[in-house]
Amino acid sequence: MAIEKLDKKALRLVCDLKNVNFETTAEVDPLQGMLGQERAVKATEFGLRIKRPGYNIFMTGLPGTGKSSYAQSIVKKLSAEEAVPDDWVYVYNFENPGEPIALNLPAGSGTDLRQHIEELLEDLKETIPKAFDGEDYETQKNAYVKEFQEARSEHLEELNKFAQEKGFALKRTSSGFVTIPLHEGEQVDEEEYSKLDQETRDEMEKKSTEVQIKAMEIMRRVQKLEKDLKEKLKELDKKIGYTAIGHLFSDLMEEYDQYPAVKDYLQAFQEDVISNLSDFRSDEEEQQNPLLMFQQQSQKQSDRRYEVNLFVDNRHSEGAPMVYETNPSYYNLVGRVEYENRFGTVVTDFSMIKPGALHRANGGYLILQARDLLTSVQSWEVLKRVLRTGEIRIENISEHFGLVAMSTLRPQPIPLDIKVVMIGNPFIYQLLYHYDEDFRKLFKIKSDFDTEMDREDDNFSTMASFISFHCDKQKLRHFNSSAVAEIVEYSTRLTEKQGKLSTRFNEIVDLLVEADTWADLGGNDLIGREDVEKALEEMVYRSDKIEQKILESIEEEEILLDLEGEKVGQVNALSVIDQGDYRFGRPSRITASTYPGRKGIINIERESDLSGNIHSKGVLIMNGYLGSRYGPLTPLNLSASLCFEQSYGGVDGDSASAAELFCLLSSLGEVPLRQDLAVTGSINQKGEIQPVGGINNKIEGYFMSCKKKGLSGSQGVIVPEKNRKSLMLKKEVIEAVENGQFNIYTINTADDGIELLSGLEVGDLIEEGKFSEDSFNDKVLQKLKHFNEVLKRQQESPAQDTQ
């Protein structure tokens, strides 16, 4: 038998303060780096250093393990050592206005280019009007006009002369010339013309046709002269324009000589200005136009095409950018083209192209929460696309769904150079890894955050450094060494392993903040152990309403629970109720009934759909245990039912399987079991007691139930020996054990539990088919044999009746 009654030293691993070399955390250097996550830190640092496509990082782990804060701190540190990426600007595409051009320049140069273009535009507005107001321009222009007018006059004179020779006068109209016949030098009206003889009229018609043909020829010459004049004036404007603005553009092109794309843009800019010189020339008539407001608006829109959209500005950056996007929607990631209402019409242009997180983080690092990304429409798909293609393309999301066919811009895509750090839980990681074929290609580095770390002497000092860091960061009072010890013990309790500390630092930080508040309310300048204990006590008090209600029901015997005496087929089991923010242990009565039959063990919880899969598995394991122990000696012909009494919710887990086995065997052997002891533990088919979770909550839950009805000194719990290292009990329980008011026993096998609960020897197999007389196993075996005899008689009775 391996039953052991534990003393107080085994119930909680207490910090030894003898070797602590500080009195308060103010004497300890704040923590630098990550605590207790060596595997994750190594993976992350490797992933950040490798500069190859697909080596993005997925940080996985349970909430509260410090993933987000570490991601930001390590990325911020590494990014400061890297080069500042280029600025990006969007400019007007003079050849294809619907596809704005993206230009990259060294950090800070984007602002310079925008300033230079603004200054250039102002110079153009000042220089061009002056150039066209000069005497040289007017003289040359007048010369061309005079030359045209003289040539036109000559042609018209030639036409008039020809018409007169043919006996016609010419009259100018809006559609050309009209010929009027002459007779003896006088114009002939229609009445006089009708009195002429037919021969004369025919002659006049013939000559009129000749004049019309000649007029058409002369008009073609005049039109050519007008066209030539326009060409000459246009060439003159270009010449004057080039002369006026050429040096402005040449100086700017020389400054951007190292950037061919910028030079190409400036060249196209210059050609567009030359082609639209009238936009820069003042006109007094326009100022008096009643539609001046609309003309000014049109002029503003014309000027906007010469602006520079400073898309990504890195002039103030120090190192590579780090962007933590908390709302990774489609447009927040890849940017958007905005629209505005102008006189009732929705319009846009390249100046309304806005960047997304990918643009701002380009050349650096982007940190995203996986859940936020996956729950935003199309965000995950667009992120995969830009990582695959290596370019950021701004598109309207409605086009992906075929909702609205709106005419819009298609900005030139920008090359992407980025490292993405995505943060999520293990479930999301496994889901993406198994069901998204792109995920494993794009996120090749897994950074797995643990929920615990080793509890070593060095880690006590490291925990003090962690506390010191948060005292400085959140402006908290500092903690003395005994308060640090209490926090370390609380951290160990969270892991349920005496050799471990929890790395769910959010819960630790919450405790620090609340302890600081209680120290403030108590007027303490330093946070001590009593402040930490008070914070823990109040944390429980805020959430333990249901637990207290259950304890009240036990005290008032609304929930039936025997805490003394002995009973057959009844045992107290321990379970845990988890509310999410708080969990506590609850004792439950398990009962068993056995009788002759062939139905086997009936799990009432399963039959009523209240049993989870693991609990049902535990019941099936009991069948295996019974078969291996008693099956070789006698057929197992029995019917049995097991039930969690007054349980109206679901039951899951196998931590009650040992208690259920003891209860079932007690019913079979008609052996009473102690009711002052509660049992928890999982059993296997070999009868070994396996460790379970929530051990501290279960023990404390039963202790509080006993306390409510009065501690007798014999009460206690039976737990697996393998759970010995999980014990981090509250001090109230430890004091009760020390004073002999409560007991905690450990067992290794089912036989240990049977002997402790029944007070009988289990009994060894002394000869084939027999156990030690009057032993527990002997009583069970005899009962099984009795069941077989009863069934045999029942089978024989119908045969006798027939005879």
Image (tube, rainbow, N blue to C red):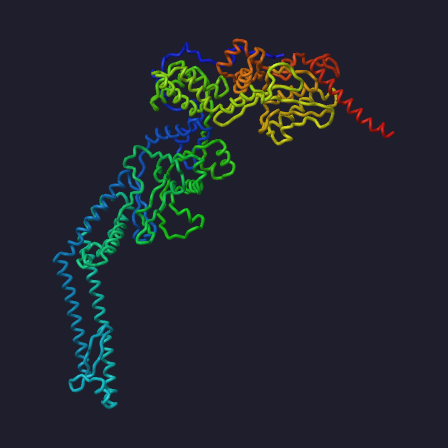
Residue 609 image offset from top left, x and y in percent:
62, 32
Q: Nearer the viewer, residue 755 or 384?
A: 755
Percent coordinates x, y for residue 294 in the rendering: 25, 55
| 259 versus 723 height, above or below | below
- Quarter holding the C terminus is top right
Quarter-wise, where is residue 41 in the image? top left
In this rendered view, identify the residue nearer to me: 220 or 59.
Answer: 59
**In this view, which residue lies farthest toward the right?**
803
- Work out whether 180 lies above or below 70: below
Q: Find residue 653 and report its horizontal and vertical position in percent.
A: 58, 26
**The residue positioned farthest toward the front in the image shown:** 556
Left or right: 658 as drawn, with respect to 443: right
Residue in front for this viewpoint, 553 or 317:
553
Would residue 189 appear left or right of 574 to someone viewing this image? left
Badge count? 0
767 or 560: nearer the eye? 560
Q: Can I make out residue 313 in this image?
A: yes
Percent position (x, y) of residue 715?
A: 58, 13
**Furthest residue in direction left, as rendered:** 135
Report whether 87 appears left or right of 249.
right
At horizontal 21% and vertical 67% (from top left) the residue drawn is 226
Residue 691 seen from this side: no
Residue visible at 27% across and 38% down?
108
Q: Quadrant of the N terminus?
A: top right
